[in-house]
Amino acid sequence: MINNIGYWVWFIIVGGVIGFLAGLITRGRGFGIIGDIVIGIVGAMLGGWMSRIVGLYPSSTIGAFLLALVGAVVLVGLTRFVVRHT
């Protein structure tokens, strides 16, 4: 288990950045600090899952960041679709 607090702080910051960028791409603004972090982290997990299904494995930090961003954008799109159709 990772006990390094710096790792977790970095994880939250990157999640917030990814969530904010996903918000900018899909709706022109972010979702607030907590929303951005949640969207970024869950989107990163979704992006990793989708990439494994297709057989893509990032070989760099930039590749992982882009996969997380794609996952976050897909997450926002799915959420908007479900909310509109309920």
Image (cartoon, rainbow, N blue to C red):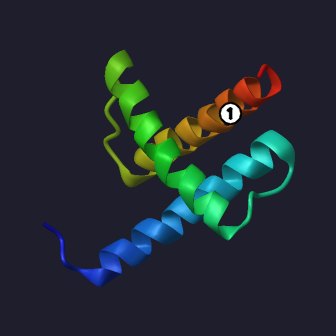
Give, as a three-letter code, the residue at label 1. Answer: Thr
Q: Which residue reaches farthest right?
A: 28
x%, y% of residue 56? 35, 26
Image vertical order of residue 62 relative to residue 3, above or below: above
Determine whether, in the image, residue 70 is placed left or right of residue 49. Answer: right
Residue drawn at 52 percent across, 43 percent down: 43
Callout 1 secondary element = helix
Total marks shown come to 1
Quarter of the image that includes the C terminus: top right
Image vertical order of residue 20 relative to residue 25, above or below: below
x%, y% of residue 17? 60, 62
Residue drawn at 23 percent across, 80 percent down: 4
Residue drawn at 59 percent across, 55 percent down: 18
Residue bearing the label numbered 1? 79
Residue drawn at 83 percent across, 56 percent down: 29
x%, y% of residue 27? 84, 44
